[in-house]
Image (cartoon, helix red, strand yellow):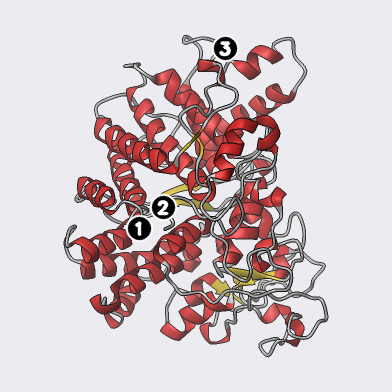
Amino acid sequence: MKTNIFNKYSLIILTGILIAFGCTKDFKNINTNPVAYGPTNFDPNYTLTTSQLTYTGSIDFAYDTWRGNLIYASTMMQGLSTVVSYWAGDKYFLNEGYTAAYWGNSAVGAYIEQVRPIVDVVEFTKGSAKYANVHQVARIWKALVFARITDLYGDVPYSEAGQGFYKSIFTPKYDRQQEIYTDLLKEVDEATNALNANGDKVTGDVIYGGDIAKWKRFGSTLLVRLAMRLTKADENLAKTYVQKAIGKTMIDNGDNATIAHDVSGARVTQNRNSQVLLGDGGQENYYTKWSKTFIDLLKNAGDPRLEKVAVTQLYLVESGKDQNAAYVTTAAVQKGMPNGKDLSGIAGRDIRQDASYTSIADYSSPNPGMIKRNGITFILSFSEGEFLLAEAAQRWGIAGSAADHYKAALKASITCLGKYDPLMAVSDGVAETFASANPYNAANGLQMINTQYWLHTNTLLDFYETWANWRRSGFPVLVPVVYPGNATGGTIPRRFPYPSEEAANNGVNYQAASSAVPGGDKLTGRVWWDK
């Protein structure tokens, strides 16, 4: 069903791209008025589909995913490691073009590809009985979109963003992150409660197929994630909104929010992580591996996920893109690549001189089932919600038993891997045995919860979320890379600097926001909630 929906909407999206960049007599109207064809022939469901797809990454060769999720977040968090020279995040270098990629510009990035379409849906459906549920889903999705943007940069255009047509605002102000989060929580809470199972069908939904009950549980789980982001910044507000969501969150892996990609629309619809990790643009397929930190943690725990997510001998030659069908999944031979290494030939830096080195092919790659072109992107999972509810229970004595939530989350984080590919499935029995043998211990509960959250989001390839929760929680305790010439003094980066283009395009607002960043507008500055 999802593939059929995507095939249908891929054509619409591709047509829209051709219109947007083509030379037509209606160019000005098309590019300034998102509903130029009027309420009788515009269906916001189509635009909702677009905004769901583009949240997984840019239609332009995974532009933001490559730079933000993979080059920076994955390696800074020691989920992945690489010796590819331009992967600046692995060594804490500042590449301003890469850190600006998620924000984007007039052609690609979150503001043009995610914000604009979802704001259009919200605005067009406001007050419409015909699209009441579409409106509420769009409000929830808009909150999801902006949460990631503000988590990466801090104070950002929010209340006035995407309002060029509606309010003629072309230089939007940067809202304070504290105010953004307060509004995100309100929006998700209100929209989730307003969803009506007997209302209009959300036909453009490629995640749940318009299932309102699932959207309600998605909204409540997202509310928990947003609220728990504030544990260091506004604990009372965090607790208040978690309490609102108790008993309403996702109930099992069947509620996991995923988008199933297809190959019919080429780069527009293919899985974003796959385009990079299969080596479409370079040698990432051969030289990007699971980090030693990640593999060692799984191996030392005897974690059953290890032989599912990691393989050796996947690519045997540097110049080839063909996968070796006889790749090795045996847990005992999996080996992560140390972060902060290169191919310079310099002692202490070259991976080939490291004690762990035997060959590049011997380091563990992501299982090919995780990076299929028609594979899935995880958006939000049952396990994330359960881990965070476990933390809420540990911190505040609410939401039930921390041990029960932790066990449910751990088991589900193991069994959900089958969603990638049936060959990656782990049985409930195996997951139960592992979880029972590794029970929750309140004495170091926050460390256990957030270390497992780190592992889980790494296996989901959602390194944006890995980085955000690590900054909030401090777990696991990661040993920073110290590489010559790094931009942080050998500390793990805390945020992305604002794009330099903003100085020219939105100078007054940019200058005010840039000068207000705690620690400075650089990799070592901090967003508001990162106390």
Q: Is residue 33 left or right of residue 449?
A: right
Q: Quadrant of residue 218?
A: top left
Residue located at (51% from left, 57% from top): 462
Q: Position of residue 440 (x, y in %)?
A: 26, 76
The disc labelled 1 sits on which kind of residue?
A: Lys
The disc labelled 2 sits on which kind of residue?
A: Trp
Q: What residue does disc 3 label?
A: 36
Mark 1–mark 3 distance (CA, rounded to whole Å): 45 Å
Residue located at (31% from left, 80% from top): 438
The disc labelled 3 sits on which kind of residue?
A: Ala
Q: What residue does disc 2 label?
A: 529
Mark 1–mark 2 distance (CA, rounded to whole Å): 6 Å
Give the camera-side residue of 261 and 473: 473
Q: What residue does disc 1 label?
A: 232
Give the camera-side residue of 266 and 251: 251
Give the quadrant of the C terminus.
bottom left
Q: Position of residue 55 (x, y in %)?
A: 53, 42
Say the numbered circle drawn on residue 99.
none
Residue located at (42% from left, 79% from top): 303
Mark earlier in primary sequence (1, 2): 1
Q: Is residue 461 left or right of residue 359?
A: left
**Tag 1 near tag 2, CB within 8 Å:** yes
Q: Element at badge 2?
A: loop
Q: Position of residue 125 (x, y in %)?
A: 40, 20
> Can you tell which of label 1 and label 3 is closer to the viewer?
1
Q: Element at badge 1?
A: loop
